[in-house]
Image (cartoon, helix red, strand yellow):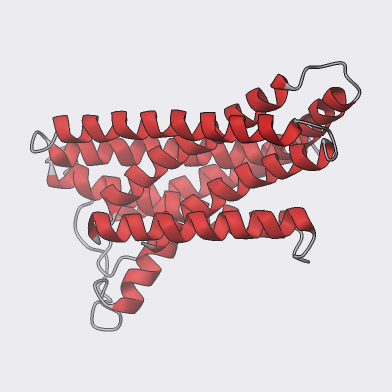
Amino acid sequence: MLASAVIVFREVLEAALIVGIVLAATKGLTGSRRWVAAGIVGGLLGSAIIASSAGALSEAVSGMGQELFNASILGVAVLMLGWHTVWMSSHGREMAAEMKRVGHAVVVGSRPLSVLAVVVGVAVLREGAETVLFVFGVSASEDGGKLATVAGCAVGLGAGITVGTLLYRGLLAIPARHLFSVTTWLVTLLAAGMAAQAVTYLSAAGLIEIATQPLWDTSWLLPENSIGGRLLHTLIGYMDRPSGGQLIAYGATLLAITGLARMVGRQHA
């Protein structure tokens, strides 16, 4: 539940900030709100279509190499999370500046109002499509069931919309960059935990037979199935009996994402 809440909160907040920038840039322009609303609706409809397609794919492979399917979903989710983190570290400011330029161009009349629907729709669709994939990855790595995942998505959705609205209205004193710094680290740790879980599925499928023995056992101190263990497992990928393969996957993912994000961020500084 917590992992899906973090993912959805991050994605919804990004979309809300983009919408907020466009709204602020076109404030007072007759008809701009309707076009922005049309873009939001279009993006949500597109995301719903992608979600239904992903659900159909999951049902089609149910019972046929489920471990391999789960490992594949997790692998794709890890790659997408890593790419998303690295891309945002270098293009986040550029994207915000572009949204402001589009809004200004519409206000001065050099671009039609319909452009607002397009840029907002594409932004919502992009964040929605990423959310679908990431939540599928989370559901493959968690044992809480669909109800917990849905509840987490609802919490993340509500929190993202609320915080985005407060930031737009200037009621929240926390700078957006600090919020994204915290969520970036949470998402990076989630990705590392997913990579370790993918190794678990591959081992269960018999595709990995090296470094599968537990290196230590802390289940006597903090069992992974306890409340605290589940919380840490969700947030940082905690395992009470980790294997060498799981630790290699975890560490390599963590180093790759943080290293690439810092390198690309310095190049665009």
Can you give x and y, in whole percent of width and height, for residue 107 in the image?
Answer: 87, 27
Q: Residue furthest bottom?
A: 221
State the residue at coordinates (61%, 42%): 15
Q: Is residue 84 visible?
A: yes
Q: Quadrant of residue 32?
A: top right
Horizontally, residue 80 falls left or right of residue 138, namely right
Residue toward you, 171 or 137: 171
Q: 122 or 106: which is nearer to us?
A: 106
Q: Residue at the location (64% across, 23% down)?
A: 118
Q: Position of residue 45 (x, y in %)?
A: 45, 31
Rendered view: 105 above or below 23? above
Looking at the image, residue 229 sits to the left or right of residue 169; the answer is left
The answer to whether residue 14 is above or below residue 172 is above
**Residue 95 visible, this orientation:** no
Residue positioned most to the left: 63
* Whole-percent x, y for residue 153 in the image: 41, 54
* Residue at image location 80% in from the left, 26% down from the top: 102
Image quadrant where residue 219 sits? bottom left
Q: Which residue shows up at 16% across the image and 44% down it?
A: 209
Give 40 or 160, whichever is nearer the viewer: 40
Q: Position of residue 236 (x, y in %)?
A: 43, 63
